[in-house]
Each structure stands twice: as C-alpha cells, then as structure tokens.
C-alpha cells in the first residue's frame, strides 16, 4: 500500500489486452512533486522494475484519470504506441551517472601540461605591481578554456569506455561548477553488473581527480520519446 497522497492506498494494475497500467486510487487534485510524492512515485517504479522484473513506460508525474474505465480507454487509444515502446524497452533499464571533479587538482594537472599557461602565470606573479589588467584577463580566459577542454576530454574518454557496456546514452545538463558529466545510459538488465564493474574500473583510473555517482535503476525516462495524445482520453 504505497499509493500517492500519503493515504496508504493500494497500488494495483488496470488491464487492456496484454497491457497494464500501474495505478492507485487518489483524490482528484493537483499533486505537487514534493519529496514525499516523488519518493512514492520512485518507490512504485522500483517495485515494478526490481521486485517484478518489468520495465515500465514512465508517465508524467501527476497524471490522473477519473475512473478505471477512463484508464482502460487510454490504454485502448494508445495501445499500438505503448506496446511498441514496451517491446523496445523490454529487459532494459536506465542508469544515471554523474561525474564531479576536484577543480584544483585538475588545474594543477593543466598547469603541468600547458607551457603557455605556466609562462603567463609566472610572468604575472613575478611582476605583480606592473602586470597589466589585460595580462590577468588573458590568464583567466586561458585557464577557463583549458578547464573546458579538459572536461570535454574526460567526458569523451568516459563515454568511449562505457560504449560497449551500454545500449545507448543521453547527455543531460550539468549542475554547478563541480559537475562535468550528467548522463543517462540504457543498459540491458542482464548486463547491469558488467556496466557497474566498468564504472568502478573507470573511477579507479581517475581516482583523486574525478568522483563518480551512479543512480538507478530507473524507468527509461531519457529514452522514451513517445508523444501520447492524452486529450483523446476524456478522463485525463
């Protein structure tokens, strides 16, 4: 009994042919994506994926139907599209990967590799009173470009090493200055351990410079692009 809304409603399935919608009863109202509601939504997905071994097609958070009949009508209206996606996503999971870096340690590495940066920095430090604003601006631009290039190189290397362990990948927007990679990978259920082991090996390569945080498994949020015409189901 893990339904939305904190009432402990039972989660069950509504069927049409060989499709099933995972639902719970709830008051007809707007449900904000609060932490409690989001965790409930996530927990239901985990039960479906992990405990029962299915890969669900994720619906937008807060999708409501007035009656079970409206839910059946929705499944009927979108049957072909849903079944096609479910077949494509069968036995597949989404795994998230976020990579952060230690900016100072990476910058030290860049200085060792970049002769021009070392020269300009030494020139400014040895002539602090006479060094120009232009020289300092030039150094700042050089550092930022070198950091951007290094981040791009790290990300390319990580993607290259994970390519054989994943079916597909998607790049998402990074958050903050420390994060250089925010990606989603579509992984075969039978290859999850291989994928995890590969991430472990890669993290060892960059130990001290990069930290890796794996999340999931999730429904294939980043890999389902189906556009459902919900307005056709009057109960939405």
Image (spheres, rainbow, N blue to C red):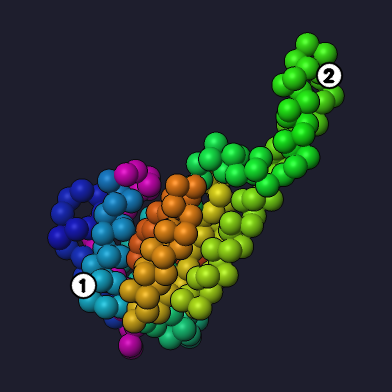
Pick the front one: 224 or 201:
201
Q: Nearer the viewer, residue 176 or 136?
A: 136
Residue, x 57% and y 70% (percent of image)? 160
- Near mark 2 (Cα within 10 A), the count class, few <14, some 14-19 or many ≥20, is few
In the rendered picture of this protein, how many numbered marks are placed on residues? 2
Q: Position of residue 27 (x, y in %)?
A: 27, 52
Mark 1 or mark 2, which has the lower sequence index?
1
Residue 208, how many percent across, how many down? Answer: 45, 47
Report the predominant secondary structure element of the magenta stretch.
loop
Tell me where residue 69 sits by quadrant: bottom left
Tag 1 residue: 51
Horizontal side of 215 relative to 107 (left or right) equals left
Quarter of the view holding residue 52: bottom left
Side of 134 where 96 appears, left or right: left
- Residue that appears at 23% across and 67% down: 47
The vertical placement of 188 against 62, above or below, is below
Q: Quadrant of the C terminus?
A: bottom left
Residue 173 lies, in percent from the top left, at 57, 51
Residue 117 vertical position relative to residue 4 in the rendered view, above or below = above
Q: What residue span does the magenta drawing correspond to?
A: 16-35
Q: State the residue lying farthest toward the bottom.
A: 17
Q: Residue furthest top?
A: 129
- Quadrant location of the N terminus in the rendered image: bottom left
What separation in Å lies between label 1 and label 2 (alpha carbons)? 65 Å
SS class, disc 1: helix
Q: Position of residue 230 (x, y in %)?
A: 49, 67
Q: Which mark is residue 132?
A: 2
The relative height of residue 134 versus residue 103 in the rendered view (above or below) is above
């Amino acid at each position: 009994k893990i339904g939305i809304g904190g009432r402990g409603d039972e989660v069950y399935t509504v069927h049409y042919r060989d499709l099933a919608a995972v639902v719970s009863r709830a008051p007809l109202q707007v449900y904000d994506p609060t932490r409690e509601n989001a965790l409930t939504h996530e927990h239901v997905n985990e039960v479906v994926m992990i405990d029962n071994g299915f890969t669900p097609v994720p619906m937008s958070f807060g999708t409501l139907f007035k009656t079970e009949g409206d839910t059946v009508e929705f499944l009927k209206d979108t049957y072909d599209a849903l079944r096609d996606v479910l077949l494509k996503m069968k036995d597949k999971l989404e795994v998230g990967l976020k990579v952060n870096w230690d900016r100072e340690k990476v910058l030290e590495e860049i200085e060792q590799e970049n002769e021009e940066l070392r020269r300009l920095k030494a020139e400014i430090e040895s002539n602090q009173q006479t060094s120009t604003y232009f020289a300092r601006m030039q150094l700042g631009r050089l550092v930022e470009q070198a950091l951007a290039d290094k981040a791009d190189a790290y990300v390319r290397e990580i993607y290259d090493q994970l390519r054989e362990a994943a079916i597909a990948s998607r790049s998402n927007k990074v958050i903050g200055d420390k994060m250089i990679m925010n990606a989603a990978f579509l992984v075969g259920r039978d290859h999850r351990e291989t994928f995890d082991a590969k991430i472990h090996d890669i993290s060892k390569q960059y130990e001290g410079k990069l930290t890796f945080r794996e999340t999931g498994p999730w429904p294939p949020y980043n890999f389902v692009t189906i556009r459902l015409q919900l307005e056709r189901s009057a109960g939405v």
